[in-house]
Amino acid sequence: MQYLPPIGIGVLYALLMSLVREPHRRRLNAVMVAGAGAAYLGGGGLGGWEFAFTALVTYVAFRGLDSWTFIGVGWLLHTVWDVVHHLKGSPLIPFADTSSLGCAICDPVIALWCLYGGPSPRELLRARRTAAPRDPAVP
């Protein structure tokens, strides 16, 4: 049961972010992934590696100001960092031992949405309607 809420949080994040109009949506998400990259700086337990990771995600987030792909990559990098913290470091939320695991489940949901271009529900429906029609002879 601990796996479903993080997935729901990722979907809710994407839905709420889709209310922001472009290009602000992409830029805001770049800022969000940059902030996520610094989430463990206050005591993640991995010493200087925390700074190296934050620098890497900051660069990826900067590139994300103009690219949904970079934002998605940033969330995937954060997923890996969450797994490292779950296994070797301190949890994201000090009083919640599995918080890094929850974040590692949530982040790929957000990453997939970003890698798909961060669309709003309306844009998703429009893309589905304009997709090439299927051949009626093929089931």
Image: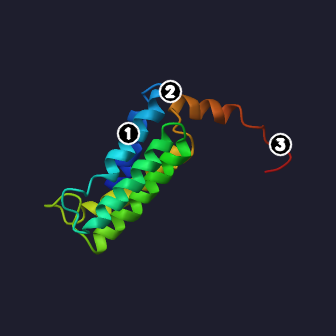
Local crowd size for mark 3, using a 10 Å CA cut-off: few (<14), some (14–19), many (≥20): few
Residue position for label 3: 136
The amino acid beneath tag 3 is Pro
Image label count: 3
Local crowd size for mark 2, using a 10 Å CA cut-off: few (<14), some (14–19), many (≥20): few
Direction from residue 69 to residue 137 in the image, left or right? right
Q: Position of residue 85 (x, y in %)?
A: 29, 68
Q: Position of residue 124 (x, y in %)?
A: 58, 35
Real-space Cα distance between discs 1 and 2? 14 Å
Residue position for label 1: 31
Q: Secondary structure at mark 2?
A: loop
Name the front one of labels 3 and 2: 2
Look at 45% across and 28% down and name the residue there. 24
Mark 3 and mark 2 lie on one chain; the one further toward the N terminus is: 2
Look at 53% across and 42% down and name the residue there. 68
Look at 24% across and 56% down and name the residue there. 41
Q: Position of residue 101 (x, y in %)?
A: 31, 64
Q: Residue 96 shows which numbered tag?
A: none
Quarter-of-image position of residue 54: bottom left
Real-space Cα distance between discs 1 and 3? 45 Å
Direction from residue 57 to residue 38 in the image, left or right? left
Name the front one of labels 1 and 3: 1
Q: Position of residue 64 (x, y in %)?
A: 49, 42
Q: Secondary structure at mark 1?
A: helix
Closest to the observer, 123 or 117: 117
Q: Residue 22 shows which numbered tag?
A: 2
The amino acid beneath tag 1 is Val
Look at 36% across and 60% down and name the residue there. 53
Quarter occupied by the N terminus: bottom left
Direction from residue 30 to residue 100 in the image, left or right? left
The amino acid beneath tag 2 is Glu
